[in-house]
Amino acid sequence: MQRSYSETTLMRASWGPAEWAAFRRGLIKILVITNLTLGAYYLLWRGTVSLNWNAWLFALALFGAELYSYIGSFLFGLTVFRLRERGEPPPAPPGLRVDVFITCYNEPVELVRKTVRAAMAIRYPHQTYLLDDGNSPAMQAMAAEEGCGYIVRSAAWKGFDRHAKAGNLINALEQTTGDFVLVLDADQVPLPQFLDRTLGYFADPLVALVQTPQYFINVPPGDPFGSQAPLFYGPIQQGKDGWNAAFFCGSNAVLRREALARTGVRFFVYDVERRIRRALREADTVIRQAERRLTKADRRRIAPALRALRQAVAQARRELDRGDTFQEVTDRFQRRAEEAARMVVASDLRQIMADLADIQAAEAAEIMRALNDEALLAELAARDRSPLAAIETVRQLIPLLVNEAMDYLPISTISVTEDMSTSMRMHATGWRSVYHDEILAYGLAPEDLRSALQQRLRWAQGTIQVMLRENPLTLPGLSLGQRLAYFDTMWSYLSGVPTVIYLISPVLYLVFGLLPVNALSDEFFWRLVPYLAINQLLFAVISWGRPTWRGQQYSLALFPLWIKAVVTAAGNVWFGKKLGFIVTPKTRQAGRYFGLVRWQLLMMALLAVAVVVGLGQLAMGWRSDGLPVLVNVFWAVYDLVMLSVVIDAAMYQPAEEQ
Amino acid sequence: MTEEFIRGALMEITVSPAGERAAVVQLRGRLDLLVAAEVKQRLAQAVSEGFRLLVVDMGEVSFVDSSGLGALIGGLKAARLAGGDLRLANLGTQAQAILELTTLNRVLRPYPNVAEALRAE
């Protein structure tokens, strides 16, 4: 009796995993709120009384960087506020029709063979397909040897944009009929229980996606390139999951085909509407341009026609808002535009109009083709034309839309990270996603710095493309939590410029004596130190034993890459420029990659000089600002430690090359 | 083999001329992912045979899924690119519902019957 009593109390007193998990989630909430409160307390003071207007540019830049970080903490805090740990998955219902897709593009055949074998060995009944975008005979032979399905692009793709991996998946979806699709990268080797552990979630008819972690087995000790993402495949995705915003990461995920198809149809309609609205906007520009160019002689004759045209545009917009069918809207617009044109086509002008018709038709077609290209569009709309030519351009603009309507695509093609974009569209269409935090596949990470950086650059570029093309803050259909959870990821990729400001700050003070704050008073410390301390504590609780140091180092140290990603993605979205790749370093020596990290090395040199100058001057008694120097030396050393990761990475050589 | 059998059993497609450049496409069965590729291909074929207006008679379609809608969009695109059109007629309740759910009815307005779809401007 007594023994069992003590056992009961012991059980009550000692916490099991569930209790600890609950404790941690509660602690995270408290820390998030404390962190944001302390941050606001600090930033209010920073923004009002502390700014040193004698160095206003620097002061404002640093304040801007701190504001950026605070917004980042807010979004991150919100994301992890509803951390969702799902634990054991529901059992997989029998009899589902599942396809396993292995996407490949010129990877070594024997490497892909391993994945193919493992995929075929998945226990739950399924069909395995190798999606070979490299169209290689050796790959095809291997698939045949292994008895695996083999899919290449159909003839329909000839002459069209192939859309890389997104296109590869779209093509395979067209040629297969499973209700569920497991997507695997060529180097992600799945475990036999993959489907048994994930299909159960689809018992909820609204679940469209189950994402599992990507874990890499070829990462050397110390993870020199920061390949593992234990914070992302863990607390971050779990946090997003809490807001029903866990997103698709391109591999190791199961998708519901009906959700892909329905989202594709929904966004086909959305795209058509978006194009009509853009065309209307361009029509407005063309008309306004023409009105400005009217000569006195033309005014009486042509101005009424232009006014009628402008009204037709406004009317079309109202009809779209009302929800009329696109055919109705465009037909009516066309009729009204023709009436407007007829107002000016007196007998003497008829011949001129006939001549114009062909030219303007070509021009209208050009505008329609440019509907996805903002820069070209603006240029075309602003082009010099006579008022008559303008009328004809507008008249021919809209009908073309319906002809050139885009295709229905089950995978988004607006970004090189089609995975994130597709899942955001699915969420906007009302589907649910699940993040299942269990490693069910073992992958291979890039083994040289160049490839590692290239991969990171592509993720960043793709994310920024989505932000610029379909911003989650404005995309219809998302909940507020989903908007912020997606935006959190995008915001984090904007850290390049703020990081440069942080890095340069100690240099500016120690070498040039520029101080962004009025004075390093007690108040500064009392406001900043608790904020930083809680921030670190929160991060530690969120990480909860997962190694996140490398990730922290890289998110700071890759600042040139983040800047490049934003610049190139913006250039791509706004000016139609190519995204570009990491260029092969010219200074590569014996497998070392210092050329790839030259900006980081330059920054480290500046920081080192700053530390020497600051401490040296202090030691020599040439300056008496001891406290500010020590504070800045502290930050400079911290920055140097963070940046030092790139030296290891640049010097790293895989074992077989050593 | 089984797949082919299932397809044959689930969907029957008949294309019959109706006027000079118009055709009525009668679908019978479930318009879903199992038959989507085939339907899309058959619609495109009708356009390449010279028909400009395709009226898809959905009267005998028992179920439509989103992949099925994708096939109809494919047919619509083929028709529009050839300067023609594709129209839906005789939709059942389920088809009507998924059309509205996806807002595809803003692109493909359903007509109450084949005659009206053929007649419309």
Image (cartoon, grey):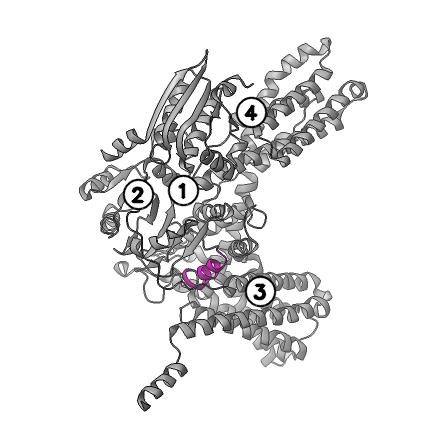
One can see residue B13 in this view: yes
State the image quarter where residue A363 is shown: top right
Residue A437 x, y percent position in the rendering = 38, 61
* Disc 4, SS: helix
The residues bearing labels 3 and 2 have C-alpha atoms spaced at a distance of 41 Å
Q: Is residue B106 left or right of residue A60?
A: left
Label number found at residue A496: none
| Mark with earlier residue (3, 4) | 4
Which one is closest to the eye, mark 1 or mark 2? 1
Read off the magenta span.
A233-244
Respond whether the residues carrying marks 1 and 2 are from the same subunit. yes
Amino acid on which the number 1 mark rests in the picture: Glu
Q: Position of residue A578 (x, y in %)?
A: 49, 40
Q: Earlier in the sequence, mark 4 or mark 2?
A: 2
Q: Chain of mark 2?
A: A
How dense is the environment of label 1, judged by Cα within 10 Å: few (below 14), some, or many (20 and up)?
A: some
Q: Nearer the viewer, residue A505 or B35?
A: B35
Residue type marked 3: Tyr
Q: Does residue B85 sit above or below A617 in this rendering?
A: above
Q: Is residue A241 magenta?
A: yes
3D distance between C-alphas at marks 3 and 4 = 51 Å
In the structure shown, which secondary structural element does the residue marked by tag 2 occupy? loop
B42 over A523 or under it: above or below? above
Vertical relation: A605 (above or below) B107:
below
Instruction: Identify the residue under disc 4.
Output: A400
Mark 3, Cα crowd under 10 Å, few <14 / some 14-19 / many 20+, is: some
Residue position for label 3: A502
Dot 4 or dot 1: first in sequence order is 1
Residue A505 rendering spot, x and y as whole percentages: 60, 66
Q: For marks 3 and 1, give the CA distance.
A: 47 Å
